[in-house]
Amino acid sequence: MTADNKFQFLLEKIYRNKGVDFSLYREGTLRRRIDSRLRTTGCVDYLEYVSYLNRNPEEYDRLIKAVTINVTEFFRNPETFRAIQQKVLPEIIKQKQEHSVIGQLQGGVDAVRQNRGLPFSRTAATTETLSPIRLYRIPPVTEGLQHSKKTIRAWCAGASYGEEAYSVAILFLQVLQKKNADYDVKILGTDIDPDCIVKAKIGLYEPSHLKAIGKHILDRYFSREGKNYRVNDAVRQLTEFKPHNMLSDKPFDKLDLILCRNVIIYFTKPLQTYVYNLFARCLKPGGFLVLGKVESLWGCSLGLFETVDNKERIYRKVNSN
Ligand SMILES: C[S@@+](CC[C@H](N)C(=O)[O-])C[C@H]1O[C@@H](n2cnc3c(N)ncnc32)[C@H](O)[C@@H]1O
């Protein structure tokens, strides 16, 4: 067996036993990470490592952890979170308000039509006349709409220990408070590594994970427990965590925002294309996608999104209809 065959044999073995398909992860990074496990376990090659896995099945989890690497922190790349706060969240809220107004107006028009028998039906021409912008500008109907309850759905894919999802939750709390707006925000944090999800749910962090957080945020959204800090209930209520493999598990839909940062970098180009297409399907029209600082859209996925902030890797799903 050649070294390459042994390597493929190992990947096949991982897939068969743990359901995780690393064959489309970037080979250089993958080999470096697996090689580090070979050294730690004292195996001379991939075949010996397969025998080691047979004798020590608990090694699978260590191997998967070594490959998927969970490094993260609160507000990682703070400038990206600033851009999300300034350019993404207000836009999502604005979109909701517009839909809310259109919904009310459309409902109103339908009611009037039914009650008074207006001489038009809901034709293409009518819909055109009732364009979102024109409807939104009719002042009396917009009054008081800030308080209508609406749902905002975000997904942190590859959320690691939860810091990213909690950071987004804190941003939402701040923005909604500033706008005096009331929405049901649900931020779903998922990761392939179940240990990450257990820790994310606990929500207790060492100070080293909180370096990018200012004191006012720490005081407001965390409580101290010994040397560590626990995320407050107000933040936790906005979040939910689940184990999930974004490459094989059922995806989520009707999302306003997806963050998938520092994950796609480990995937080959064809796999990246698959994931970008998947994200486009998961997002509502006009929904936002945030990637890691060294990740970007390419090829046919460029046509699915428009760029909102190139430096911070923020994109918006293009309206296809
Ligand atoms: C480097 S961390 C990034 C964490 C966070 N997004 C950030 O940028 O700080 C990458 C995470 O992606 C997860 N991951 C890797 N492959 C995955 C997959 N197929 N599905 C879900 N999560 C995955 C890893 O377990 C790891 O926790």
Image (cartoon, grey):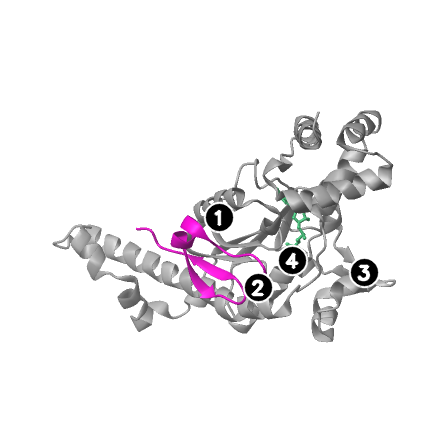
> Contact (CB < 8 A) between labels 1 and 2?
no
Task: State which tag comes first along the sequence, 3 or 4.
Answer: 4
Tag 2 residue: 172
| Mark 1 residue element | helix
Front of the two marks 1 and 4? 1
Q: Answer above or below: position of 220 versus 46.
A: below
Residue 6 badge? none
Q: CA distance from mark 3 to mark 1?
A: 33 Å
Residue 206 badge? 3
Amino acid of disc 1: Tyr
Q: Is residue 225 left or right of residue 297?
A: right
Q: CA distance from mark 4 to mark 2?
A: 13 Å
> Contact (CB < 8 A) between labels 3 and 1?
no
Q: Answer above or below: position of 218 versus 71.
A: below
- Tell me the residue at 77%/41% (across/down): 35
For the N terminus, the quadrant is top right
Tag 1 residue: 276
**Residue 188 appears in the rendering:** no
| Mark 2 residue element | helix
The verdict on label 4 being within 8 Å of ligand 1 is yes
- Tell me the residue at 60%/66% (across/down): 171
Q: Badge 3: few (under 14), some or many (20 or more) residues near its Cα, within 10 Å?
A: few
> Which of 5/40 is in front?
5
Tag 4 residue: 164
